[in-house]
Amino acid sequence: MGNVISRAKLLVGAVYLINQTLNSLEKRLKKSPGLPVPNPSLPFWTVPKSSIAAIQQPLPDHADIVVVGSGITAASFVYNVLEADSALRVVVLEAREVCSGATGRNGGHINAPLWQDWIETKEQHGEKDARMLINFRLAHIKEMQAVASKEDILKESQVRETEHLEVHLDKDTFEETCEGLAAWKADMPEVAGDYEAVASAEAQAKYGITEGAAGVVVGPGGAMHPYRFVTNLFAKLLERYSDRFSIASHTPCTSIQAPTASTPYYTVRTPSGNVLATHVVHATNGWISHLVEPMRTKVVPTRGTMSAQRPGTALGRTTHDGQRSYVFYPGGLGYDYLTQLPAGEHELMFGGGWAAAALASALAELGCADDAAFSVPGAAHLAGALPLYFARDAWGREKGRTKAVWGGILGISADGLPWVGRLPHKLAGRAPPPASSAPRAPHKETGEARATTAAPGEWISAGYTGEGMVHAWMCGKALASMVLDKEDAIQDWFPETLRITEARWKKANLEEFISHKMSG
Ligand SMILES: Cc1cc2nc3c(=O)[nH]c(=O)nc-3n(C[C@H](O)[C@H](O)[C@H](O)COP(=O)(O)OP(=O)(O)OC[C@H]3O[C@@H](n4cnc5c(N)ncnc54)[C@H](O)[C@@H]3O)c2cc1C
Ligand SMILES: *[C@@H]1O[C@H](CO)[C@@H](O)[C@H](O)[C@H]1NC(C)=O
């Protein structure tokens, strides 16, 4: 009898706790992420700072394009617009230091979801679109390598190919991933041939991972130093296009005012003054729904935790000092991810921690846009897990491990895919400037004055769901073509499934997405 009563009490307590957790989650999801907090935690990537970190060029009265945000989305968009040989005047507004959002705080992986969501994506979008999406993701490593090489920033940005290992500690998740892999291999043998599942004993011997591992999937991957990639690229562009490109850091966009009869442009407001603009590009990812309120619950700010740690004395032999990258699935919710710097102390850039956190702590990161702090349970897990993921002799002796811990804000998309393109009028909530406000230039052959961009408007590329390094660059490039009215240029490679439409917006349902992910 006593037993029954205490069980009932426990149940009431649990229901109460879950109810409280869900209530506060709901509140957070409805709230604006606000402007980025002014005192973010310090990521290891940003030491030493870029020379342009605090650049604050004077605001022009008018710009053809105002870009809000200065991460990899902004960098790609701006690079591809400026390099397209137009005369457009572009301004980047950044609330804090340049590249102080997710791009300067992430795990540095260029590892595309391939087989992991293949069966699902094929079911939802059909095989043709699913293939296009895979090829789009896979294109990132080559494209960013080509840009880094052309711009002579390959060394700084560390864009490189890795041997990537997806390590499963749990037998069930390993079996599941093997099923996905087999299906993907059957459908896309032309690219899937390089990826192989290796079961436990062989995997341990070959890759120096823990004997607790059920197996790994091995194949080509990539890693980079995203902060240096973006800041070095911006520095080059500032020099090359000093007459028509500028960056104002510490200049948040606080609101955007619709055009009026007397001012046929957007008025982009900041504490340092206003800029009149023909186009506004939202490159704010996790913060998107502050200025674009209808994107609330469609792109959800979510805090991730990252750390930089010294490897054990022997580990370099196993990780090849940065030429391997890893994702560890401990079983349960989420995963931990590891890249290693190819230089210096070969620091391990290790993030995740969701899997180890209790449900309530994991959920507390959803809807959280505060990167001044990080998840303590997440960080505690990260601080202990690394040596346990490798075989004892592969790790070696300890050297004093954690050098830095920080938080970062990613943007979870309610249907798992990024949102790219012209913001439909209804979602923008503001009317665009009239077509006559588009910049004009004489046509090369006829000499007739023609608009050099698509019709004025607001544009977005956001919601990479923690996988920005295999989506953001090509999304930014596609967005540049859209704004330049060169849709033909992207037809062959841009997955239309990523385009933002009102219909997709209506359909995307966060609860469904989350409950689906949680049930595995
Ligand atoms: C901890 C963590 C680990 C991750 N690991 C990986 C990984 O290993 N691989 C991977 O592929 N992806 C990873 N991601 C995701 C990836 O970092 C992001 O998808 C990507 O960086 C997003 O780039 P972005 O330019 O769109 O946004 P951000 O880099 O976040 O840039 C947005 C910028 O907008 C600014 N801003 C916001 N609001 C305003 C405003 N109103 N006015 C002016 N400026 C504003 C912000 O300060 C910020 O600088 C990770 C993310 C996090 C947080
Ligand atoms: C859950 O919380 C809501 C809002 O506070 C409350 O109305 C409801 O009664 C609670 N339900 C339970 C089962 O505690």
Image (tube, grey):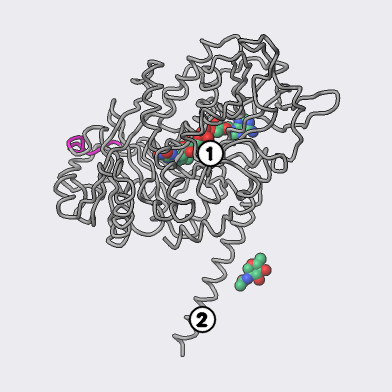
Mark 2–mark 1 distance (CA, rounded to whole Å): 40 Å
Q: Quarter of the image holding residue 358?
A: bottom left
Q: Position of residue 104 (x, y in %)?
A: 46, 31
Q: Give the left or right position of residue 225, taking residue 92 as reference.
A: left
Type of amino acid at the residue the image marks with label 1: Ala
Residue 295 is left or right of residue 418, and the answer is right
Number of on-image labels: 2
Tell which of 172 and 102 is nearer to you: 172
Queried whether the magenta region covers residue 311, the answer comes back as yes
In this view, the residue farthest toward the front is: 446
Relative image position of residue 460 (x, y in whole percent): 60, 35
Q: In the rendered structure, find residue 372 and report the number of the disc placed on it.
A: 1
Camera-nearest residue between 447 and 458? 447
Q: Which mark is residue 8?
A: 2
- The x and y percentages for residue 520 are 41, 60
Quadrant of picture, ligand 2: bottom right
Q: Residue at x 77, y 32 (%)?
A: 258
Q: Judge from the rendering whether residue 515 lies leftward or rightward of residue 275; answer left or right.
A: left
